Amino acid sequence: MIKVSKDSERSIDGIVFGRVDFVGSLGLDRGAIESEKITNSVLQVSKKCKEIDIDLIVGGAVSYDARENLRKFKSVHLSRFETRKIIFDSKSLDNENLEQALKDAVHFELLWLFNKREYYSNINKEDDKRIDMLEARWRILENQ
């Protein structure tokens, strides 16, 4: 992708490095996300992105445990990092409230999923009475 971006008239603005997807593609467990092997892979991509001046966004199991590796990436080149629903500027790694911000991001996602589940559950159930009524009507009509 980086080579295509560099050599093409149609450039890209950046790359999102999804660490969960990456470890999965290597047949590794999610526990390997903060390993030296994965960190070194992200650092290689970080260097390449810096060379051609494109954004690097890191995702995949971003939590407070990831902060040291995220800081390593930032020392080379990191534009942003993200949880599934929240995008942080890399400058936030220097914020003294980072731990709380990441906790809030997890809480937000949990609330988002609760809301989504409730919303679609209500949609799923909204026609139950109508279906019951039409099924009863159909049974009568079918027997006539």
Image (cartoon, rainbow, N blue to C red):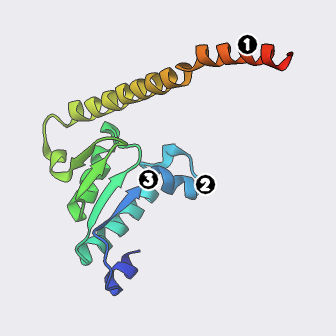
Image side of residue 80 versus residue 17, left or right: left
| The one of 89 and 142 positioned closer to us in this rendering | 142
Q: Amino acid at mark 1?
A: Ala
For disc 1, the marked residue is 136
- What residue sits 21% from the left and 60% below the top? 75
Mark positioned earlier in the residue sequence (3 or 1): 3
Is label 2 in a helix, a strand or a loop? loop
For disc 2, the marked residue is 27
Q: Residues within 10 Å of mark 3 (few under 14, many from 20)?
A: many
Quarter holding the N terminus?
bottom left
Mark positioned earlier in the residue sequence (2 or 3): 3
Query: Residue 14: image x %, image y %?
Result: 30, 66
Give the mark count: 3
Q: Amino acid at mark 2?
A: Gly
Q: Amino acid at mark 3?
A: Arg
| The one of 6 and 77 positioned closer to us in this rendering | 6
For disc 3, the marked residue is 19
Q: Is residue 90 above or below residue 119?
A: below
Image side of residue 90 versus residue 34, left or right: left
Q: Are marks 2 and 3 in contact (CB under 8 Å)?
A: no
Mark positioned earlier in the residue sequence (1 or 2): 2
- What residue sits 49% from the left and 48% below the top? 32
